[in-house]
Amino acid sequence: MDEVNLLQLLKEKDEASLLVLIDTYLPLIEKMSFQSGIDPQEIPTVVQNTINYIYRRIEVLEEDTMTNWIYISTCRAIKNYKQPTKDKNLSDFIKAYGYYLEHREKIILHYCIAGLDYKYKLPLVIHYFHRKTLEEIANILHIDESKVKQNIEDGFLKLEKVYKSTNGDEQHYENMESLLSEIQFDYDRLPLFTTDKQEILFNVKQLQANQKWKKFIPIAIGVVAFIAFSIFSMNYLSNEKEKQAIQAEEEKRKENIEVTEEPTEEAEELDPEIIEYFENAKKMLAEEFNVDSVNHFPLVSRVELILKDIKANNRGLSEYAKDESKYFIDHMLTPPSIFESNLDPDNAIPEHSLTNMLYAVAMFENDFQEYLIDILTKHQISSADYHAIVTSQELLSAYDGPQELTDFISTLTNQGYMLQHNLETETLNVKYNFERLKQILTAKGYSEGYLAYTDLAPQLNNYYFGNTDWEDFPEILIELETIVNMYGSEFDDDFYNLLMSTIGQYLNGFITGLDGYTQIEEQNRKSYYLFLDDYPDSVFWEIINETVKEWEENNWVNDGSYVDFTSVRVLFDERFENIKWKDITLIYQWPPLSENTITIYQNYKEAKDLSSLIELEPFEIVSLYDYVNNHGEQDLFSFLTTGEETLKWPISNGPPHLVMTEYTSDHTAFVHLASWDLQTVDTLEMKKVDGIWRFIH
């Protein structure tokens, strides 16, 4: 999906486009945050703030590309984010970052970059690690180009000086240019920090709901109407002021005038009712964890920040904000053990949903991993002790380590997790025990499809934590395809959507490849050819084949092609089994104009020549039909139907997300206009008459 279409879909509040935005730009936001010195544990928060900032201002984004706005928003989020105060002792820093960077020299360089003022740090990061020109950096940072050049030069000298001082004169030192080039290799191989994309999506949806409420005036009388109008007026004026401020900022940027950062808003105080609800939820979570308090868990701190954000974006709508806050607290602080006890294959409500439990499993796994790292660092536990820690899980009473770690292992066990020692990376990792979950699902009467999923689930969970090898993606895709084909009818809607989303992630991950959006290396090209040879009957074969053909014609340069997960659903829907991948079109606007509709119409209007319609595909005729319907060209409108009565138009109850053309012969076809979930499908039957596709009644 190109950036122009993505921006248009985001403005239309298209949910699938949010997933595209997150999947596409998450690596860029994370990498830049890490390079700028944001603590790895805090990067997900910066990611959320960046996506929120983009979403809130989506209506006024016009001229710049989406990538440019991602850079602008990420820089703003980085500068505005206040990291928890931590003692940046160099020796502790080296221990903590040995997981991410290969050599001591690189860790020290990263330490020195992180310590620079943002005035120097951001231009350096964007210039050296993102290869942006001075003009592009000036555009991103809203400062004059000459100022960018000066800040890069001054920052380089400051970095060189502090690096020599920190590393010691006796240490080997080549030159700063070489060091910056070498550390780029490590930056390009950073793991995934934001493991819960659904949490990001959930939080953006809250913003979407908030904005809808701000534009809504209840139909009421008397005092209620007056109060509602007052609320609306205040929010309307607030929104207008914000838009005017952003537009003014844009004008200043175009004049290359440095813009002063917006003042940081005062911290929001939560309502007493929400504080009480939050405290009760924490107490219940502490009881489940069998600990005195959960305030030290990272997730709890994040929940509190987001609660304040919910309130800040719902000024004047306190009851709505309270409801949203309570829902969010329940959603975030319900641990896997609660979901596990409520699982019921015959009850589809959220509290009994396996899908929601799996989301919780991934979220808490990430949080437990963060907390584990904190414990290991606090008690200075080295990798030499990892084996003893892992074996102690079977008999905790025999472990003589810190009591805090013993209690934590007990909590993990009760929640269905376990510790694993990765010998290759020398790390201690929290992993969910899916074998145990399979036994629970079996006892509760879940069908074979859900049990088959649990066999694959450990590998899928690794994807969210960046631990799955790219070479394994084809095999995982085929296993997912097998599960859907064999058991698809067994799954409830939420679980089926989860599978479709997962397939979309792996399919796009495989297409993106190890080389990203660059020229694909020779050894990696073989993986695509092997897939085509090994899996000729796969529903993904045509997608990979068409993609490879495009690459071959383009000197094997990956142009950033993206497979929409809605389109993936079509592959597994028996209603559309005769539709080829190349005949599926995503709709980015309504009416659904094809690229050349207006030109075709203007040519016809001038010459009244029907021959220009002969080469058009069925969807192009659908698009033209809609266009002439809105422009009063009655003769052409009537000609495009084969019956005596004109076709009722528009035929759809709402804007479609997909257009699918099903060719039943060389001269007959069906055009299906479908909603994103394929629940609403309007079908047009067409026939080619004298070389021109026309509608059949």
Image (cartoon, rainbow, N blue to C red):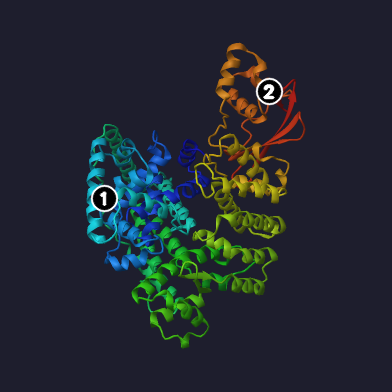
Q: Amino acid type of disc 1?
A: Tyr
Q: For the residue carrying disc 2, how many other residues have a C-alpha within 10 Å: few (<14), some (14-19), or many (20+)?
A: many
Q: Is residue 574 above or below residue 84?
A: above
Q: Which mark is residue 232?
A: none
Q: Is residue 31 among the parts visible in the rendering? A: yes
Q: Which mark is residue 640?
A: 2
Q: What is the number of callouts on the image?
A: 2
- The residue drawn where x is 58% and y is 16% is 603
Q: Is residue 57 above or below residue 391?
A: above
Residue 434 sits in which quadrant? bottom right
Q: Which mark is residue 118?
A: 1
Looking at the figure, which quarter contains the C terminus? top right
Q: Nearer the viewer, mark 2 or mark 1?
A: 1
Work out whether residue 340 or residue 560 is closer to the camera in this orientation and state it.
Answer: 560
Q: Residue furthest bottom?
A: 398
The secondary element bearing badge 2 is classed as: loop
The percent coordinates of residue 239 (x first, y second) are 33, 42
The percent coordinates of residue 674 (x first, y second) are 63, 41
Q: Is residue 585 above or below residue 193?
A: above
